[in-house]
Image (cartoon, helix red, strand yellow):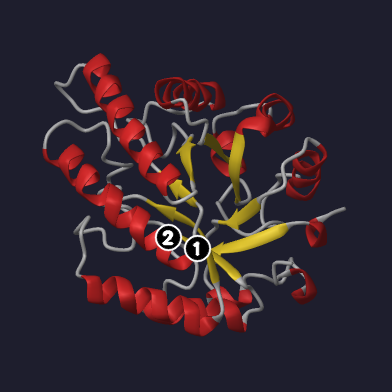
């Protein structure tokens, strides 16, 4: 048990950001990792030129890194936005334009998990209208994910850092997951369980794991306070990941933390080099 018993991947949208996007897969590989994940890399457009998609695929392939998680278009992230799919008007349209682009790219690199960030509440918009739009778009995304043999992830964020995001508890995200699965009949919508966000919300992490491990499709970690590497805060991450494994979660654990003041390559000293390559 412990960290060496997990399957870790590196989030290249929060780590190695001192490097251009196309150099990050090789940097992760040089640090000993064989699996990576990404937020949607083109924050300005849901439909980048095919040449840019091809260049990212080549960078992943050349580095020998497997992409195991990809966000759909989510607006300005990092930045003020927290997704697009529940935001009426242009942002919802951009999300829809992205669905097949993201799914096709994921299929091209063998990625089988697509994360759909819900989006913030918008001043002047009826929350019920936003939720109805969200369900409509999540159903489309779930069908696209199913087409390529992937799961659709729904993520809880934390209220202190994302005060306008409505899914700020594990039960809130699980309710959306269940609604999507009921609407599609596909069963491929699952929970993205981020231990940092849940801890920021003050949730009982062990209880969340017991209750929802069976509906969890992906896990992300960072320590709290500070969103740094494991060991920089007070979360018992090693124990919690063991609890997840004991509860039957077999999947990836995304390293979605800030490297601090040092280069990203130096932010993995908590994890033995022998435990970084995914078996």
In terms of depth relative to the viewer, which is nearer, 156 or 7? 7
Residue farthest to the right, as pictured: 1
Q: Residue at x 44, y 43 (%)?
A: 146
Question: Label 2 vs label 1: CA separation?
Answer: 5 Å
Which quarter of the rendered picture does the C terminus lie within?
A: bottom right
Q: Could you tell me if residue 19 is visible in this image?
A: no
Is residue 27 depicted above or below 9 in this figure?
below
Q: Residues within 10 Å of mark 2 (few under 14, many from 20)?
A: some
Q: Residue at x 18, y 41 (%)?
A: 91
List the residue tagged with mark 2: 107
Expressed as whole percent of the image width and height from the top left, the position of residue 47 reads 20, 59
Q: Residue at x 48, y 79 (%)?
A: 61
Picture disc at residue 110: 1
SS state under label 1: loop
Is residue 177 depicted above or below 266 in this figure?
above
Picture disc at residue 198: none
Q: Are marks 2 and 1 in contact (CB under 8 Å)?
A: yes
Is residue 136 depicted above or below 111 in this figure?
above
């Amino acid at each position: 048990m412990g960290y060496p018993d997990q399957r870790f991947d590196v989030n290249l949208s929060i780590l190695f950001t001192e490097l251009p996007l196309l150099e990050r897969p090789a940097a992760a590989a040089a640090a000993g990792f064989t699996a990576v994940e990404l937020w949607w890399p083109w924050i300005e457009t849901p439909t980048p030129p095919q040449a840019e998609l091809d260049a990212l695929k080549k960078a992943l392939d050349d580095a020998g890194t497997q992409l195991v998680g990809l966000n759909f278009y989510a607006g300005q992230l990092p930045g003020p936005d927290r997704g697009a799919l529940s935001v009426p008007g242009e942002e919802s349209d951009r999300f829809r334009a992205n669905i097949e682009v993201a799914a096709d790219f994921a299929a091209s690199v063998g990625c089988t998990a697509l994360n759909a960030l819900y989006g913030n509440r918008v001043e002047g918009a009826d929350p019920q209208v936003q939720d109805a739009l969200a369900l409509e778009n999540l159903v489309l995304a779930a069908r696209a994910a199913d087409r390529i043999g992937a799961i659709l992830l729904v993520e809880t964020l934390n209220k202190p850092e994302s005060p306008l995001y409505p899914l700020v508890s594990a039960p809130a995200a699980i309710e959306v997951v269940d609604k999507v699965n009921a609407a599609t009949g596909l069963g491929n919508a699952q929970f993205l369980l981020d231990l940092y966000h849940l801890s920021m919300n003050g949730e009982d992490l062990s209880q969340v794991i017991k209750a929802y491990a069976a509906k969890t499709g992906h896990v992300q970690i960072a320590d709290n306070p500070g969103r740094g590497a494991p060991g920089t805060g007070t979360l018992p991450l090693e124990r919690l990941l063991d609890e997840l494994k004991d509860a039957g979660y077999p999947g990836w654990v995304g390293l979605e933390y800030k490297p601090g003041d040092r280069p990203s390559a130096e932010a993995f000293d908590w994890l033995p080099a022998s435990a970084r390559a995914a078996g």
